[in-house]
Image (spheres, rainbow, N blue to C red):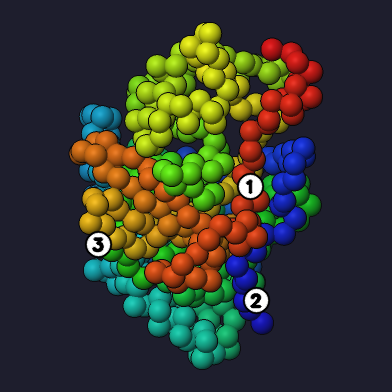
Amino acid sequence: MLKKISRFQKAGLEQKNGKLLLFAAFSVSALLTAGCSNGSPEVSDTGAAAADDGGPSFDEWDLAGAERIAEICGDIYKEEAEMRSKNKAETSASGSLKTMRRIAERLGENGYAAVDSENQVDMAGSEQVIEFCKAVDKKKNDKITIVVILDCGFRKFDLETENGTVNIVRGYYRYDERGCLQNRSVVSYPADVWEYTEEGYLIFEGSYFSDEDFVLTLDDATEHTALRVLPLDEKCRELNRKYILSVGYRQNNIFLTDWSEEDFGDLDFYDIFDIFYPLLYEEPVPYAADENLGVGAVYQIPEDVFENVILSYFPIDRETLRQKTTYLLEEASYEYRPRGFYEAEYPDIPYPEAVSYTENPDGTITLVVHAVYPNGNDSMAYSHRTVIRPLNENCFQYVSNQMLPSFLSDGMEGGSSEDDSNIWWHSSRLTKEEWIETYGGTE
């Protein structure tokens, strides 16, 4: 029986005040070299976990299937690699998206369902996936191959359903520096979680035995997959990349709390400074944490530097900004403590996806955004409504953000609700009192 997932399903990961959760991420992979002929790219078998006995009996999951995919889109990968080697400055995000879109379309023309790994282009062959999901619901037998496109390779999911259960064979293939396709791993597992969500995502999860993971965790390895099946308005994608995705949900609360230009609420302007300083000055923030984890670094940032960053992106006056920060009048500077060891956040977080937009009469743009969390098996962990004010081609301001209860549809009135959003990974900066207690006043 497949488990139906609930909103933001993630057990045992809660942060409380004064408590730090440390997480270590391990990645273990093997790669054996193999020669390449003048013909199609060769695939070298790493000897990784193969399909278990009793797993899906697919013809497509073997090396020949991967070679077929490589043959179909290998020329596009080659063009992209040559462009990167000639001029790295030209390898923009938009260029990569164009490449991903070309590969997906090419694979779709050849009968595959295909989408990029970050769900930033529309899936080709989505109707096949929808029909497969219907077969699962009706407990009919069916098969499908879904290709997930990576920068330098792809993952191939061969799915087979029988009597309502779903078995998966996942192969991971990557091109090496010589243009040869390498088989990094092939694993097989049943889908313990399977859902086609209202937001148009196919989400599945399963576990398999891995020697490396068992040594580290004494448990099976678990894979989470979230693939957008339904298309999105390209304008939504464009606005999301420009205004939301570039900031995201890591180490800031711009999109995690209610605020407006009339009331900036609990916005953390120090986190905002960290994010937008590199964008404005095109260099890393020079005010870094101390290399000694037991020492708390404190800086005084000249008022013109700090205010220029904040006022470039937020419609706040200097007086209000100084009230919401630690402003040193005699020094004409802002006291600044960079995030340290005790303010770390869990690294695995959702990503934003704008699902609708409204161009308002006053020139602002309202975006409704869903937080997609693949590793939590959730295509809408929470949602928020964000208003942007474009100023010119490259300049804009954030006007407001409103957290929406996840059950509300677009257009309904929402409100701030920490219970609904449950943003467990986010860690606020230490207050001055907490900082002194933690570091003992050491600066």
From the image, tell me which residue sits under label 3.
106
Dot 2 or dot 3: first in sequence order is: 2
Is there a contact, CB below 8 Å, between mark 1 and mark 3? no
Q: What is the number of callouts on the image?
A: 3
Q: Quadrant of the N terminus?
A: bottom right
Residue 241 visible in this rendered orientation of the protein: no
Is there a contact, CB below 8 Å, between mark 2 and mark 1? no
Which marked residue is nearer to the observer: mark 2 or mark 1? 1
Which marked residue is nearer to the observer: mark 2 or mark 3? 2
- At label 2, the amino acid type is Lys
Residue extending furthest left?
Answer: 393
Dot 2 or dot 1: first in sequence order is: 2
From the image, tell me which residue sits under label 1.
425
Q: Is residue 115 left or right of residue 343?
A: left
From the image, tell me which residue sits under label 2.
3
Residue 265 falls in image quadrant? top right
- At label 3, the amino acid type is Arg
- At label 1, the amino acid type is Trp
Q: Is the residue marked by circle 3 packed among few (<14), some (14-19), or many (20+) residues within 10 Å?
A: some
Q: Is the residue marked by circle 1 packed among few (<14), some (14-19), or many (20+) residues within 10 Å?
A: many
In the rendered image, the vertical position of residue 396 relative to residue 61, given as above or below: above
Numbered disc 2: secondary structure = loop
Which residue is pictured at 37% across the width and 63% down the height?
355
Rounded to the nearest whole Å, what is the CA distance between mark 2 and mark 1? 24 Å
Dot 1 or dot 3: first in sequence order is: 3
Numbered disc 3: secondary structure = helix
Q: In this orientation, which residue lies closer to the viewer: 15 or 4?
A: 15
Q: Quadrant of the C terminus?
A: top right
Which residue is pictured at 64% across the width and 40% down the height?
427
Residue 316 place in picture, x, y as percent:
41, 34
Which residue is pictured at 55% across the width and 15% down the height?
328
